[in-house]
Image (tube, coloured by chain):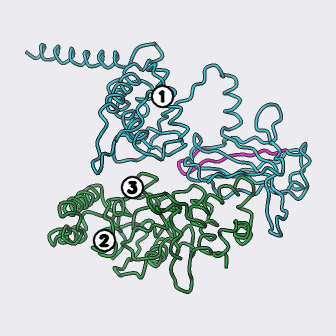
Chain colours: A cyan, B green
Amino acid sequence: MPQTTLNIINEIKITKQGINPDVKINLIEEKLTGIKISVEVDLKRHNFDTDCKVSLQSFDRRGSGFEPFILGSIIDLANDKNEFRYFIPEVNKDEVRFRLLVSKVGELKKIKVNRIIGRCEINKFFNDENQVDDKKNFKTESLLPTKEQDIGTVFKIEMIPDRKPYLILKSGCNIKYNLDNNIDPIQKTLIYTSAIRELLTNYLIDSRFENCIYKEKWWKLISEKVGESIDDFPKSFLTIDREAVNIEMQTVNWINEVSEIMVSNLLDSSGKKLIAKFIEKNTLNENRYSEETEYGV
Amino acid sequence: MNIRRFTENGHVKYIKLYNKIKDSINEENKNIEKGYTVALQNEIKSLKEDISNSEEIFPKIEIKNKSFKDSYEFGVYLNKLLENQEYSNISFDKKLWDWLALFYFENIFSSNARGYNENRYILSDDWFTVYRHLVRTPWYVVRTYGKFGKLFLSGPSYFGKDWLEQFISHRICEKYTKSAEISYYLYYDEKEDKPKPGYSKKFIRIKNKKTLVKASLGRLVDKLNQYNEIYNIWDMDTKDIINLLPKEFSKLRT
């Protein structure tokens, strides 16, 4: 059903970056159980009514919002420096995001409402944001970041519509370190080949990802790497013919080709392809084995 | 008996055994009664009795094997048992939840059930299916939404609940606990002590055409998402939010 929202009250945009932003959120400490943050707010320049309430909401990795912290009313925040510290459970620093709201109680058709009149969406800590600006030209976004968790298998893919997919690696066995630092090309090749196959298959099977923004980003990246238009990409993994469900072989071939290009041709900082490193490492192992066998004889 | 959690080995045995039950049911043309053979029932019994497959949790908590009127009553009981346990320690502890699933297997596994998917008995890692577990979910819903969780836990413990499935998958519902309160006031018939029929699904098929169900739970979720962009709904009274809802909800408001 189409929905139209009439914007009656202009919301005031609260700033989070640049010189003297209205709100600064910084990370104080990251623990296994959550993160500790500091929040600095100075909203005086906006002249909000003194009874307006200011609250800060944090969101977990799935985009589900926690109950907001109430920072106070505008009159409570009249000082030059208003600093708060909070602990947010069950989130880590790379995934959390925030929403600062200024709201005012009013009436709509005799119903008491608390309308949002100022807002700021915050996706990065203030310090990180400034660091990104400094390195603007060098910063790239990983579309499959890694993280460690206590899982039963060596790795798995975590995918949620409109959230970045994650490559979850088993904690306590150094795989994340090896992968992130390009230490073991064999491990990296095997894990990424399988992970990318699973990711592409899920994007093509599960209709919940139809309009996912990260699927779009992945499709754009693949299009650049394989030199093929997104319009020519397969649309589904399965076809339904009456009651029979069939795997679309063209799609399987496409997934294989894309995985090959995306993983085997992955370059490290020295410009070496991952597949070349894989072959080199395996050849080295083979030579060592031959030498040892030779020596033993 | 005290509450226990599986050892690594015990957990693997349980997962294998459940998959064996599932395969057996599939072989019997998805007939649960035929597939869950006496031999498999005995295997469940032996696994339960063999304490070398599990270890007690601390502090010790006594647990009773009893039956429950519905999943809500089951959830209330589990919350009482686990009230002194740290949420983050137990929330995703597969070895604990799956041991409890084995302990209450007779309650949550029945030939009257409409499904026997493993996610009901083996805690899933996936956000989409984690809420299908027939033991953890009643605990989680009562812990999170209190008495308003009744709407989502109505029906026997072996039933996968459509109300819950339609509700919990939305981000706005997960932590905004007032969403459960609003849903309860709109859709739970306290006199009949059960949910009002016909509102759990957002769409139904009428004459082979996908048709929107007015005032359904899905429509409520749409409205809450919309209000969340305009109002600070966390700071608003549930009654005011209910009164804001459009006309289609009128007959549910009373």
A168 or A150: nearer the viewer: A168
Work out how far the residue at label 1 is from the one at label 3, CA to CA, in angstroms. 35 Å
* Circles 3, 2 touching at the beta carbon (< 8 Å): no
Are the residues under badges 3 and 2 in a single subunit? yes
Residue identified by numbered label 2: B109
- Against B224, is A264 above or below? above
Picture quadrant of residue B69: bottom left
Q: Quadrant of the N terminus of chain B?
A: bottom left
Q: Which chain carries label 3?
A: B
Main SS class of the magenta portion in the image: strand
Q: Name the residue under label 1.
A: A231
User: Can you identify the residue that label 3 sits on?
Assistant: B124
Closest to the camera, between mark 1 and mark 3, is: 1
Q: Which amino acid does label 3 sit on?
A: Ser
Left or right of A83? Residue B203 is left
* Residue shown at 75% from the left, 57% from the top: B231
